[in-house]
Amino acid sequence: MGIRRETPLRGQSAFRHGGSNPRWRVQSGGMKMMEAYQDIIVLEQAQSEMGNPLLTGKAMEGLHKALVSISGLRIGVSFPLHTENDIGGHIRLHGKASDLERLSKCKGMSHLDDYLEISEFQPTPAEHRFQNVRRVQSKSNPARVRRRIMRNLNVSEEEALKIYPDSKKQILRLPYFLIDSTSTGQKSIRVFVKHTMPLDRHADGDFGSYGLSPVATVPLF
């Protein structure tokens, strides 16, 4: 992804291609798609200067562009250091080793060299549980509600604003990262993320262009 690779995190050896290596024996079925992982870390000084939501969001924007431009990639993400209110400065990519290799050649994060550290690929530990990581959107988008009010009640935008001000927006108490929309030009959109409780079984499903899924699980360790 255009960022220097640092020494492997957590003291594990670096990823190496080697189909016969027993360390790469994973569960059958969907879990073969999650045989490897890679960590993206926001550097500590950058966290204190700019904050996790912003820098994690910039990294996620780079991932999004790569997943959109490179066909056939199946990458899931998790945020191991998230708390109730903070996304944390740690993004973990989960996928096939070959998909992570293709992703690593993308230049989508090269402008973040001074802020991020990326580990080598690692084999997913043999002992792990599972977790679903999904995007959660507020059901009360004020702009959308006001458009509906204007259409149904035939009132002006100013009148709709009085009926449904921004203060009525539902506040989600979840960690989030910030993105800018290239399609609408809107800045600093909050992407709220929910991690489920640890699960004992893997669930297959599709991942979106941010590596999130309403159904599929990723390894938890």
Image (cartoon, helix red, strand yellow):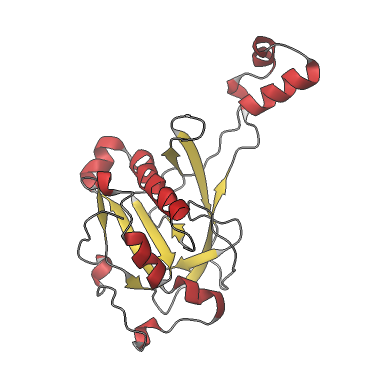
Residue located 34% across and 53% down the image: 90
Q: Is residue 189 visible?
A: yes
| Viewer-side residue, 4 vs 122 | 4
Residue located 73% across and 18% down the image: 150
Residue 110 x %, y %: 26, 48
Residue 191 x %, y %: 49, 41
Q: Quadrant of the N terminus?
A: bottom left
| Viewer-side residue, 68 vs 56 | 68
Residue located 57% across and 63% down the image: 216
Residue 10 x %, y %: 27, 67
Q: Is residue 219 above or below residue 195?
A: below
Residue 212 x %, y %: 52, 54
Left or right placement of residue 35 versus residue 90 in this view: right
**How many marks are shown on the rendered structure?**
0
Residue located 37% across and 60% down the image: 103
| Viewer-side residue, 67 vs 51 | 67
Q: Is residue 183 above or below residue 82?
A: above
Q: Quadrant of the C terminus?
A: bottom left
Q: Is residue 35 above or below residue 116?
A: below
* Snapshot quadrant of residue 81: bottom left
Q: Is residue 82 visible?
A: no
